[in-house]
Amino acid sequence: MYYLSKSKYCKGIQCKDILYYDKHNPEEAEDTANSSVLENGTEVGELARGIFGPYLNVSFNEDLSKMLEETKKYLENENCIVTEASFNYDGNFCSVDILVKKNDKYYIYEVKSSSEVKDIYEDDLSYQVYVLRSLGLNVEGAYLVHINSSYVRGEELELDKLFTIEDLTDLALSKQDEVKEKIKEIKDYMDEDKEPTVDLSDKCNSPYACPYFEFCKRKVGIKENSVFDLSWTRFSKKLKYYNQGIITFEDLLEANNKGSKPALTPNEKLQVEGVVYGLGDSINTDGIKSFLDGLTYPLYLLDFETYMQPIPEIVGTRPNQQIPFQYSLHIINSKEDLKDLDNVTHKEFLAEAGTDPRRAVAEALVRDIPMNVMSMAYNKSFEQGRLTELAAAFPDLSSHLLNIRDNIVDLAEPFQKKNYYNNAMEGKHTIKLVLPALFPNDPELDYHNLDQVHNGGEAMSIFLEMRNMTPEEVEITRSNLLKYCGLDTFAMVKILSKLYEVSEDIKKKVK
């Protein structure tokens, strides 16, 4: 008989094939989970244990029978709070995040690090209610505990304000027959142990991105440059094409030319035609020139690195607020400097780990960027958002910080508007795609050649880890963080230089 846990049950709710592949083809799974999200979930779960006061915790054990025994022992108390209380009914296992027992009545609390209630959370909770009720426990309440995104940290962390508790008792009870049927359906399917008949559907992307999606695509014969490779396109639209038998980029063009629905957007058509017809660079001279003519010098190229914490440690911050801890700044005094990049000045700042970095970052910014000069960022809304938050936090620096914010231009604009495009950008305009598209095989601009830090997610995690490192490790890590962030703004210098170069080349050709 196939044994279920609440995580397996939720996977089976999404798609039973996930469970089959977990058993037979685990090597085909792609890592779709964000490690920092998983770490945050663990941290939130551990903190939430104390939301109702002192508690008894059931220690994890590979031997689940030990957890069952420990739970039984704790529940001999008339009134108690038990975390990770574990139960098994007919091969259906679950550990309850927080179980409150009051006079033989039981209240289940499921903890999530999210700030919203999702359908799959309701299924998770309903499964736990089923297991406990099937064992004869009088479950009186079922609740979801999640982060209150509007909470602002005070001097002391207030758990009752940090967490929001949603009463889902009626909903969980109403789903009990459905849970019973689903359990039977999943177990029957797994006990048959037959190779699945692959059918791509909305379950491939909901409620989570399926780790076996690429594997299933290969099984149905879908290769690269398919409808599923369209950028900036909803999965539902891709699926609609697929269900119509429109699979390849060639199919998409043919259907679009015949007026089939849904029609390709201009960006989708640009991406598809670029691949199908093998087009080279697509350059809108007027659009690029208009952008470049709007720049003034000196020009300050800025990029922030930030971290987020679901449990805010800094007074005055919210859960998952972006906290800037580092920036890189390349300064171009005139466009002539772009002909010799040795003339470009570089400044940078990296705060000390384990401190509130915001004041130090803000002071360094107002020191490094004068009032009333033009700054540049790639996807400027992110940098503008951080500057707005810093200005609110430090009123004495507010006017200067807001002046920087209000004078930022966006280097992503020419690529977002497709004034400069080639196939390697895959229909997108992120710097991680634009950079190698403009400078293929350039080791100086390859993030993979960096040590330790290769993307923003790693920068965030590593900065938070630094407070637990030795001085020698901190020194190495700081150097690697500075190199990573420095490459972000150096990449902007190179991209801007390329825009001028292409513009000049076009002028020469016209002459």
Image: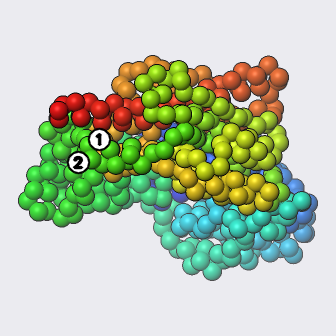
Residue 236 tag number: none
The answer to whether marks 2 and 1 mark residues whose Cβ atoms lie closer than 8 Å is: yes
Residue of label 2: 270
| Label 2 element class | helix
Residue sitting at 89 percent across and 59 percent down?
155
Closer-to-camera residue (270/151): 270
In the image, residue 92 sits, relative to residue 472, either above or below, namely below
- Left or right of residue 108, residue 189 in this image: left
Closer-to-camera residue (73/381): 381
- Left or right of residue 461, residue 192 in this image: left
**Residue 150 x %, y %:** 70, 68
**Residue 120 x %, y %:** 54, 63
| Label 1 element class | strand
Task: Please count the marks in the image.
Answer: 2
Disc 2 versus disc 1: nearer the observer: 1
When asked about the image quadrant of residue 173, the answer is bottom right
Q: CA distance from mark 2 to mark 1?
A: 9 Å
Residue sitting at 71 percent across and 27 percent down?
478
